[in-house]
Image (cartoon, rainbow, N blue to C red):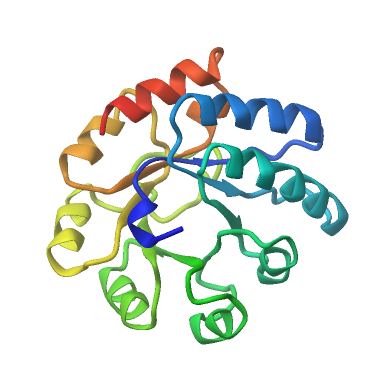
Amino acid sequence: MSRSEISGLYAITPDITDTGRLCQMVEQTLAGGVGCLQYRNKSADAPLRLVQSSALLPLCQRYQVPLIINDYLELACQIGADGLHVGQDDSTLPAIKDRLAPHKLIGVSCYSQLARAVEAEKAGASYVAFGAFFPSATKPNAVRAAVSLISEAKSVLSVPVVAIGGIDLNNAASLVARGCDAIAVSQALFGAEDIEFAAKCFSRLF
């Protein structure tokens, strides 16, 4: 996978324990045209994370969509995921690059901090994520970012820019119009009555 493949709809999995149901939901997003999938389950223990991510990897490979692991470097290495996404308090980029193969993707959450994104790019990040741009049910206390940050970031960064936080079909177009390469969606996608149709609607924005 290459860093140019971070584009379009970037799906983030919900916190559910039923692995079979999770795979069904993810396959619907893949059929709907998702461009990247991040496995994130904050409520799961280590054995369940291993089971779920291992089940999702062949699904993503079938659709040629990169699977990114949130936070857990050891897990990403263990299952051979396509990359890792880290936040402010997770592993440092040098430590990650020591463990991951050169072609693996590394994403960095930069919240509302353009300077953090510039440093992440210099350190070898494959893409950066900004947000939350809107109130988020998944992370209600997340730092808010101005929509104008996207166009500002695009003017100084060469890596893909991902927008995250409270994104739904009512507000996503405003972010795409600012030039973001991808929109990261969880609740508005996996909570939709028709997940595949929702994925298609998000994907069409690009």
**Residue at the image position 79 percent from the left and 49 percent from the top:** 44
**Residue at the image position 18 percent from the left and 47 percent from the top:** 179
Residue 95 vs residue 114, the one in the foreground: 95
Image: 174 above or below 94: above
* Residue 171 lies in quadrant: top left
Q: Residue furthest top?
A: 193
x and y percentages locating residue 46 in the rendered image: 83, 59
The answer to whether residue 13 of the structure is visible from this angle is no
Badge count: 0
**Residue at the image position 75 percent from the left and 66 percent from the top:** 78
Q: Which residue lies furthest to the right in this view?
A: 47
Quadrant of the image for the C terminus?
top left
The answer to whether residue 163 of the structure is visible from this angle is yes
Q: In this view, does 188 lie to the left or right of 130?
A: right
x and y percentages locating residue 148 in the rendered image: 17, 51
Image: 190 above or below 96: above
Q: Which residue lies furthest to the left in this view?
A: 155
x and y percentages locating residue 45 in the rendered image: 83, 54
Residue 137 vs residue 150, the one in the foreground: 150
**Residue at the image position 25 percent from the left and 48 percent from the top:** 180
Image: 143 above or below 91: above
* Residue 149 lies in quadrant: bottom left
* Residue 193 lies in quadrant: top right
x and y percentages locating residue 82 in the rendered image: 56, 59
